Image (cartoon, rainbow, N blue to C red):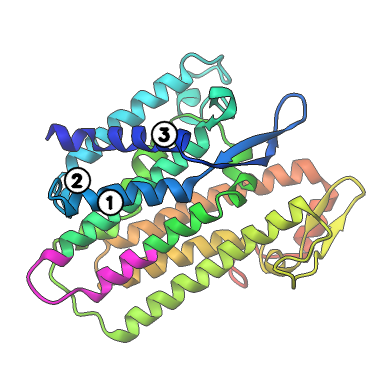
């Protein structure tokens, strides 16, 4: 029981140590400091993931741990992650000057925008996202290993689910430089929402489908359903990754063609410029639509669409991203004024083309 409770603590400490010790590259981000200089970030997430998973595989091969050890201790792990999340929230929020008059609001949203340590070598947000991604991947692999150890044939749906989720994590860390230009990095502070979210919700809840299905018999999903799941995930990945990459290229060089193909179609008022072509001409938050589609594909991959629990994952994205879209539109309207009104007239739909 103690081992399970300590798993998230050990994992996050290991990720921090590897992040500091392993080689990385320095890149400028979108966020700027008080002097107007872009914050620099040290990135090596894919290498940290590879080393961590490699160490876990070695431990299993040497007989030091069972392949499904995280499944066996999942509830203790969840309790340990909750305790770590609460401690992190208190440690990062309480010493900082208040932002709002209500303590609960500060605890939830945070007081500091970009906490950094070791001269900027460790950025709190990037460490949280990296640690959450690594622990999520370890959970997915361990939970899937438990499902495959059950009597019967290999479960094609579980294999597909684990493969797609691994793609999701590897893709995120491959393009972690792109996420230096996303909403979380420039719009949110670090408190319970971000800290507890990355330490508990991200690694434990994202794989809620396997919490429900890993100990169940194979539902015998037809091949067409698995193909549909893979295609839905792929469509979502193209929308989310394509949109984020196009915006990244545009932010760094407004004259560059994204992917060497998409011309930088934009509108400007002389001070600000807004991208309104390519992916960003489909809807104002087409990347959010892509995230929802990927989550739907993952849920379908388990092969039991009648089970309501795996559907909590895509429903979570709807609950998260619709309010974020509303807040982001409000921020953009205040920042860009009439230019934003022109953009909204050109790009009518907020998230889902033709629907919303």
Residue 309 x %, y %: 27, 59
Residue numbers of the magenta segment: 148-164
Callout 1: few (<14), some (14-19), or many (20+) C-alpha neighbours within 10 Å?
Answer: many
Query: Magenta part mainly helix, strand or loop?
Result: helix
> Residue 74 bears which disc, if any?
2
> Residue 16 bears which disc, if any?
3
- Determine whether, in the image, residue 352 is placed left or right of residue 332: left
Determine the secondary structure under disc 3.
helix
Q: CA distance from mark 1 to mark 3?
A: 18 Å
Is residue 205 visible to the viewer in this orientation of the structure? no
Identify the image quadrant of the C terminus. Answer: bottom right
Q: CA distance from mark 3 to mark 2?
A: 22 Å
| 26 to 225, vertically: above or below | above
> Residue 139 bears which disc, if any?
1
Determine the secondary structure under disc 1.
helix
Upstream in the sequence, badge 2 or badge 1? 2
- Determine whether, in the image, residue 59 is placed left or right of residue 163: left
Q: Residue at x 50, y 31 (%)?
A: 124
In the foreground, 352 or 254 = 254
Identify the image quadrant of the N terminus. Answer: top left
Residue 206 x %, y %: 35, 53
| 251 to 297, vertically: above or below | above
């Amino acid at each position: 029981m103690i081992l399970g409770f300590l798993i998230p603590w050990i994992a996050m400490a290991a990720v921090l140590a590897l992040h500091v010790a392993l080689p990385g590259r320095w890149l400028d981000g979108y966020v700027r400091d008080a002097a107007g200089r872009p914050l620099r970030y040290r990135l090596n997430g894919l290498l940290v993931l590879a080393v961590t998973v490699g160490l876990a595989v070695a431990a299993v091969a040497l007989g030091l741990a069972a392949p499904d050890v995280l499944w066996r201790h999942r509830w203790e792990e969840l309790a340990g992650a909750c305790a770590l999340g609460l401690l992190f929230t208190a440690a990062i929020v309480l010493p900082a000057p208040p932002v709002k008059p209500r303590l609960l609001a500060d605890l939830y949203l945070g007081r500091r925008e970009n906490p950094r340590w070791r001269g900027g070598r460790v950025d709190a947000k990037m460490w949280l996202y990296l640690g959450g991604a690594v622990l999520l991947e370890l959970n997915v692999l361990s939970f899937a290993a438990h499902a495959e150890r059950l009597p019967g044939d290999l479960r094609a749906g579980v294999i597909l689910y684990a493969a797609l989720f691994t793609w999701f994590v590897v893709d995120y860390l491959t393009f972690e430089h792109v996420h230096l230009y996303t909403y979380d990095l420039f719009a949110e502070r670090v408190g319970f929402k971000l800290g507890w979210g990355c330490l508990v919700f991200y690694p434990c809840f994202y794989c809620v489908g396997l919490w429900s299905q890993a100990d169940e018999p194979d539902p015998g999903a037809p091949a067409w359903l698995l193909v549909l799941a893979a295609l839905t995930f792929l469509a979502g990945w193209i929308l989310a990754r394509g949109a984020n990459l196009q915006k990244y290229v545009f932010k760094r060089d407004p004259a560059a063609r994204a992917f060497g193909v998409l011309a930088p179609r934009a509108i400007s008022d002389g001070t600000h410029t807004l991208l309104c072509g390519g992916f960003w001409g489909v809807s104002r938050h087409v990347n959010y639509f892509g995230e929802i589609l990927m989550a739907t594909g993952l849920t379908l991959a388990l092969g039991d669409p009648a089970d309501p629990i795996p559907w909590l994952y895509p429903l979570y994205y709807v609950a998260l991203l619709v309010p974020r879209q509303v807040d982001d539109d409000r921020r953009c309207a205040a920042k860009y004024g009439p230019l934003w009104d022109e953009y909204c007239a050109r790009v009518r739909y907020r998230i889902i083309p033709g629907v919303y």
